[in-house]
Amino acid sequence: LGYKTSVYALSGQVRSLYSYAMNFNDKVIFVTGGSSGIGAAIAVKFAAHGAKVAIVGRNETKLKNVSVECERSGSKPLIIIADVARDGDADKAISATITHFGKIDVLVNNAGITGYSSIVTNDTMVLFDRIMSVNLRAAVYITHLTVPYLIETKGNIINVSSIASTCALSKGHYAYCTSKAALDHFSRCIALELAPKGVRVNTVNPGPVKTDFVENMRTLNAYSDDVWEKLKTIMPLKRIGNSEEIADLVIFVASDNAGSVTGSSFFSDNGSLVRGAFE
Ligand code: NDP
């Protein structure tokens, strides 16, 4: 009985340590692309964990909807209407956050776009520049602006990448895949530079998740109507990811529980990358 009692007492301590480490009370989280899908789920979950959240996007209506959800689960976020691909907008977004909250503890570079991109069409470079400017350049510039504040708070950065960083995904997505591969490597490189300053940098790499993102790809005729059913059958776990489970992973990587983790990539993809070549 004594042994069991001490095991229970210990597991209680572990549980309370766990919830302590996952507690984001008074932490300030800056999330780009917080107006829908994965970014919205990240904002709402952080708010539920006690954080103060700033959400960035171009669509005011969607931002306001997410704001209501955040308030319901925790507290009212700061909403910032900005195009992350414009340096002036990014400058204003960071300074608005500092004016409002006084600091930043976690930066989540989540805003992303895709689009059909082929290497042989006339608009190849237009599409390439657009995708790189949102998925990579904006993340680099916003990181540059935020790092001085993260050094002060010993904070961390999560870049929302993709399984596309490690595979060609499907024909016609070379620009997207290239942008995400570069985002992963950018993250590793700055993880090394920022480690001595106490700032961690990691990526979270989702597989297919049912959001507007994939719906937009469908309207671009990249996928057919039954895409979800088809995807489900080829996933080793026979399921599709959802925004909430990607948000849970982001929360874990951002938390003190992951205090030793930097320069790493965390895949949540229902096993899609371990599919056998001959299956
Ligand atoms: P959504 O299309 O639902 O969300 C994309 C978000 O990015 C929106 O909030 C959008 O806001 C924002 N955004 C896009 N361009 C800009 C811009 N120029 N300035 C500011 N905000 C911008 O897609 P997801 O939630 O699925 O995607 C989020 C991230 O997850 C992306 O980086 C994507 O690459 C990644 N990902 C998604 C996967 C999926 O299957 N869904 C799989 C792997 C990775 P607004 O429209 O208001 O500007």
Image (cartoon, grey):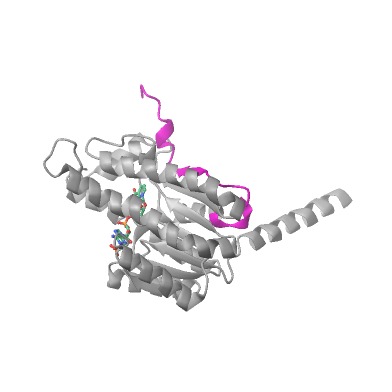
Relative side of 237 to 261, left or right: left
**Residue at point 38% right, 73% down?**
79
Identify whether 205 is placed above or below 157: above
For the residue pair 83 and 43, the one nearer the viewer reads as 83
Where is residue 125 shown, x and y percent of the image?
19, 44
Task: Examine the image and state in which quarter residue 151 appears.
Answer: bottom right
Of all residues shown, which one is farthest toward the top?
Answer: 278
Q: Residue 71 placed where, x, y %?
A: 45, 75
Q: Is residue 122 above or below residue 147?
A: above
- Residue under the image location 50 percent in, 73 percent down: 74
- Please say whether residue 128 is one of the residues in the magenta stretch: no
Judged from the image, the quadrant occupied by ligand 1 is: bottom left
Counting every numbered tag in the picture gives 0
Left or right, 278 with respect to 9, comes to left
* Residue under the image location 64 percent in, 59 percent down: 21
Q: Position of residue 195 (x, y in %)?
A: 58, 50
Which part of the image, by quadrant, shows the C terminus?
A: top left
Question: In which image quadrant can residue 166 be found?
Answer: top left
The answer to whether residue 19 is left or right of residue 234 is right
Farthest residue to the left: give it.
122
Residue 256 magenta-highlighted: yes
Q: Answer whether residue 1 is visible to the viewer in this image.
A: no
What are the residue bounds of the magenta stretch?
254-279
Report the residue that reaches farthest toward the right. 2
Q: Is residue 52 above or below residue 227?
A: below
- Residue drawn 50% across the image and 55% down it: 157
**Height in image: 100 above or below 89?**
below
| Res. 235 visible in picture | yes
Residue 244 in the image: x percent, y percent?
44, 56
